[in-house]
Amino acid sequence: MDVLIAALIEMAEPLRLAMLILGVLLGLVVGVIPGIGGIFGLTILIPITYGLDPISAFALLLGMASVTTTSDTIPAVLIGVPGTVGAAATVVDGHEMAKNGEAARALGAAYTASMIGGVFGAVMLALSIPVMRPLVLLLNYGDLFAITVFGLTLVALLSGSNWIKGLLAAHLGALVAYVGLDPYEGVERWTFGQVYLWDGVPVAVVFLGLFAIPELAGVLARGQIQTTMLAPEPGGLLRGIRDALRHWRLILRSGSIGAFLGAVPGVGVVVIEWVAYGDAARAKTDAAKGEPAYGKGNIRGVIAPESANNAKEGGSLLPTLAFGIPGSASMAILLGAFAVHGVVPGPKMLEENATLLVTMILTVAVANVLGAVICLGLTPWLARLARVPATSLVPLALVFVGIGAFYAAKDWRDLLLLVVFGLLGLVLRRLGWSRPAFALGFVLAPNLERFFFLSWQISGWSWLTQPVVLIFLAIAATTILRSLGSWRRGRGERTKDAPTRLDLSFTLAVLAVVLVAGVSLLRMPEAAAIFPAIVVGSALVFILLLIWQTGLPQAVGDRQGLVADLGFILIPGGLGLAILALGHLAGPLVFLMLAAWRFGSPRPLVALVQAVLALAVVYAIFDFLVPQSWPQPWLWPF
């Protein structure tokens, strides 16, 4: 109790409170801009902390890191674009609610769940530090592999109307993730001789292409975010808050999942939020209460991942503080801040820096409350974006998407890959393939390979007989077999997803890509090829199963719809050319003015003001806060 009182007194000093509030505000801004994320925020803030005392420094850093998974809900719900990878699951039901005029309800529930989940994670952190070490150290690489496979299987089966397409999408994402230099033999895998690809395909570019481009194309086709012209439901914000409080058991259960898995190094936020989503989706209580199906705007599909990904922050801080093992990428950067300020994490920290440790825990809790309160206060205005004409909203959103992608490596190939994955995302959405499953396969594949390779090196194939491995792999296999059994029983029934020539053509194209990838593995060393070969073999099985399931095409398919979707790619392609030709400020300005002229809205002066304000935000983040070395434009001298 004395340590808690001392920590409260230390935190109450004006400078430390100011640093906490500043960190929260910066974290909210970072989370709302697609493509940059909390790692970017920590990177820009650590140099600012050099002149601060440790408590003030970590109030700023943890204040920022704790709330990026709160504000990333805003683009996820409103335009279907996850602000960070931790909001991908929120898109599934949250964006559907926005389309149905329930944006305020979705945001209100998400912020309330984030706040409670974040505080719960901080409490779990405080209670677990003395006893968590044996439990975390109990898990080995094989156990982590099995847990990751289990989470990936859940996503693939729960995403989309066709579970085979979901599993195949996850396999395709994994194969894309293996592009680059093999970490074990140092050989190139599918880089096509491009040094740019040695470090792999940038994560931000993949997510923005898969989610942002298709959803913005949909918004433009509808004319606004909402699919109906009805006004938003009165009291939507309060209804969302009540929804979250009514589902308090779900928040605590999802928060427990987030806190526990967050404490396990190597299990990222993407796994955590999807495991929480899958746990909620398995409950059979929603239909009786009149809630929509999951994926169609179910409020529980918003509450579960939001409470889990905020509770994760407290969990991932646990191994960082308790024994100096970062629980996530952002925590790895935080370790650098510990070194700067002379703080040594480890078991003795509870004795030697108890006050600082408690202030960190309090910072995480207070930051989550502040972030949620600020976002709740802004929700009535944010919800109005659902009724803004698409001709005004889409070009502005594309500017931030383009800059977020170009920031990855500041290479023209960033923008090219944005267009490529945008095209892929449009095709996947049109043909009913799960984009979240593809994204999760892409994110988790390196961890899966690492866990597999280390287990294989240490124990050969005997690690597959370990109890935790057997349990999680058996659950995943049983889930797939049950889905296969359900499909076979209903195979003769005609569904609304009747096979088309477009479906079969795309499936055959995927088959060709997988076969080429598999043949190329024959020329690689065993260590570099073994796990990608397992993925290729598994993918071939599911492709054949999908072809068998599809059978002969029943129709041509919606060619006009697909052509219209693909035509949208010319717009981000034009933005990319403008950025490369004129620079990251002048290019978007010209793009926005041309878009206003092309769509006839808004008036030229209003369009100019909107463009200038958008570029002011870009300049403030990418040039003022962190001066960047942008490549010289093709046609601009400076």
Image: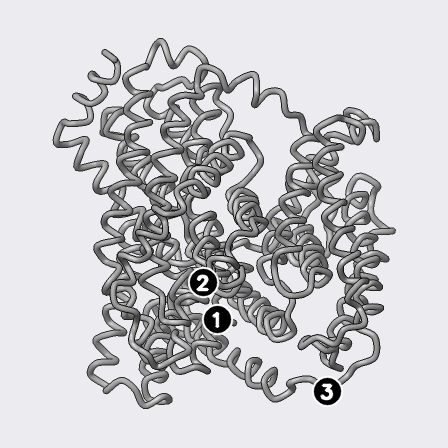
Cα–Cα span, label 1 and label 3:
24 Å
- The residue at the point 36 percent across, 19 percent down is 343
Q: Which residue is mark 3?
A: 556
Secondary element at tag 2: loop
Label located before the other in sequence (1 or 2): 2
Residue at 41% x, 69% y: name it: 633
* Left or right side of 315 for 355: left
- Labels 1 and 3: the sequence-earlier one: 1
Measured as percent of width and height from the top left, residue 294 is found at: 53, 59
| The quadrant where residue 388 appears | bottom left
Quarter the C terminus occupies: bottom left
Q: Position of residue 130 (x, y in %)?
A: 44, 15
Residue ID for mark 1: 215
Whether residue 409 sits left or right of residue 358 in the image: it is right
The residue nearer to you, when weighing 527 against 143, is: 143
Task: Using the image, tell me which numbered label, if any, was put on residue 81.
Answer: 2
Q: Nearer the viewer, mark 1 or mark 3?
A: 3
Q: Is residue 360 left or right of residue 84?
A: left
Give the amino acid type for the residue marked by disc 3 in the picture. Answer: Val
Residue type (three-letter) at the residue carrying disc 2: Val
Please report contact status of discs 1 and 2: CB closer than 8 Å, yes or no: yes
Contact between marks 1 and 3 (CB within 8 A): the answer is no
Q: Quadrant of residue 349?
A: top left
Q: Position of residue 582 (x, y in %)?
A: 38, 73
Q: Secondary structure at mark 3?
A: loop
The nearer-to-camera label among 2 and 3 is 3
Q: Nearer the viewer, residue 458 or 247?
A: 247
Q: How far is disc 2 from disc 3 in space, using C-alphas?
A: 30 Å
Separation of marks 1 and 2 at Cα, in angstroms: 7 Å
Looking at marks 2 and 3 on the same chain, the residue that comes earlier in the sequence is marked by 2
Q: Is residue 379 visible?
A: yes
